[in-house]
Every structure is written in C-alpha cells, then in structure tokens.
Image: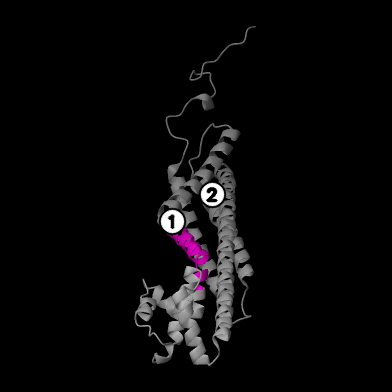
Amino acid sequence: MPDTQIAPGSEHAPRWTMESSRSAVSWGAVIAGAVISAALTGALFIGGTGLGFLAVSPWSGDGASGSALAIGTIVWMFATHVIAYGIAGYVTGRLRTNWIDVPNDEIYFRDTAHGFLVWAVSAVVALFMLGSTAASIASGTAKAGASLAGAGLGAASAVVADAGSDQAQGLNLDYFTDVLLRPADPAARSGDPDKEVGRILARSLQEGDVSPQDSDYLLRLVADRAGVPPEQAQERLDAVQQQARQAAQKLEQQAREAADAARKAAAAFALWGFASLLLGAFVASLAATIGGRARTRW
C-alpha cells in the first residue's frame, strides 16, 4: 500500500504542523525579565560598592589590599550576573505564553531564546544608557595614561624647583624675566638666587642641556655664593646636572611603568567583564528553560 502524503493544514495533519498567526515570542515576559535583571543588577552593584568601602581603610596596613579588592570585585560581578539573570530568566519562563500542541524540543528552544532575549534586551539598554559614561571613562583613562607616560620631565622639574606648578598654568616667563634682569656680575645680584637657579636647572632638563650663557652665569654665581674656585664650581654644576638627569629618567620610567600597569589592569578587567556577561547569558537561558518547564506542568 503506497504511503499517503498528508498536506500541512489538512484536517488529518498534526496540530503542531500548522503555522500560528501569533508570534512565538512573549515580549511582555521578556521585557518584564529585562526590567527585573536591570533592577537586581543595580541593587547588587550598590551593595557590592558598600561592601567595598567597608573593606578598605585609610590607614596603612589596615583593610583589604588592592589585589584582594580587585579579586573581590570580579567575584561579585560574576555573582551579580548569576543572581540577576538567573531570577530574571526564571520569571520570564514562568510568565511566557503557554504554548499548546508544540513539541518538547521546540518548547525548549523557545524558552532558551526567551532567556537569551532577556539578557540581550537588558544588555542593550544598559550599554545605551552607559555608553557615554563608558566613553568618558575610556577617554579619561587614555589621557591619564598619556599624561603619566610624559610626566617624567615635568615631575623632575618640580623636584628641582617650584617652577613646575607655574608651568602647569601656561607658558612660564619667569626664566626669560631672569635672563632679562640678569646682572653682569652675579655678586651684584640682590635677593635669594635659589629660585632663579632652580628655574635654570628646570629649563636645562626640558631643553636637554644648559645653554652656554646659563652655564657661565651659574659658574660665576656658584663660585661667588659658595666661595669656591671656578674649577670646583664646574664640578658641582656637572654633578648636579647628572643627578637631575638621573632623577628625570627615574621618574619617567616609573610613570611609564604605572601607565603600563594601568593599561594591563584595564584590559584584564574588561576581559573578566566580558566573561561575566557571557555567563549571564547562559544563566538567563538556562533559568528560562527551568521556569518554562514549571509553567507547562500546570
């Protein structure tokens, strides 16, 4: 007896082969789950922030260390996504439409898709709302790293003299004022020459070397103020310049290391955040299937 083909939609065809005019997505349940996940995530992050402030201490040696706080932050971020998306996915599965005459594998797929939609909707809304903030943070981090990387010479100048604070406000004309009013005989100069010498040394660090005019003036000023012969004044000037260069190089190296450490920490935190988001998507999908099974029992 030949096989008889049953056309979909005929009265003898199974009901699940008929195409429904209603969407398989229960958007009301998805939106409700997304709102729940957003509320729980915000509440848990606020609670985690409070715990973090309780763990730190302004006193040296007290409270949690920086590495412990970093690990705790990552663990709390994972726990937040598991709790928030787990509850949101389960609620979505319980609230979705009760599909009639749908195969079990199709129900499983739809529940999984509803949980993933909860995660996707909440993530898109969060990224949209926090996009400008994240961009500002990223821009500020980049600028801070660039400032740290180029802060060596400026910090060394501040160590040598107070001129660094004036230069931070704009073009510092004190050095040129000193040159303009510099006496032919350093012994005839009135007042304390410490700041003038500091500005000369600070400019030498910026320019890379002391100009011949500044060097001659410093030699005569050191010889007069310290009461040493010109040869010994030259030795003092060379020694101070060498020490200033070493200090500038050390500060620049420390600034570069700090910027590199900040870059690596930001990259690691971003990767852990990405992993926690993927875990949240998995938990939401799984919880939605559990909630969906509980929904179909009755």
Is label 1 in a helix, a strand or a loop?
helix
Magenta-highlighted residues: 133-155
Q: CA distance from mark 2 to mark 1?
A: 30 Å
Q: Decide which of 86, 204 is in the foreground and name it.
A: 204
The residue at 43%/83% (across/down) is: 196
In the rendered image, residue 146 lying in the magenta stretch gets the answer yes
Disc 1: which residue = 135
Residue 118 coordinates in the image, percent (x, y)? 49, 47
User: Which residue is located at x 50 percent, y 65 percent?
Assistant: 150
Hey, what amino acid is under mark 1? Answer: Ala
Q: Magenta segment, principal secondary structure?
A: helix
Looking at the picture, does residue 216 appear above or below residue 191? above
**Mark sitting on residue 89:** 2
Say whether disc 2 or disc 1 marks the residue closer to the N-terminus. Answer: 2
Residue 279 x/y as whole percent: 59, 50
**Relative horizontal placement of residue 184, taking residue 47 as reference (left or right):** left
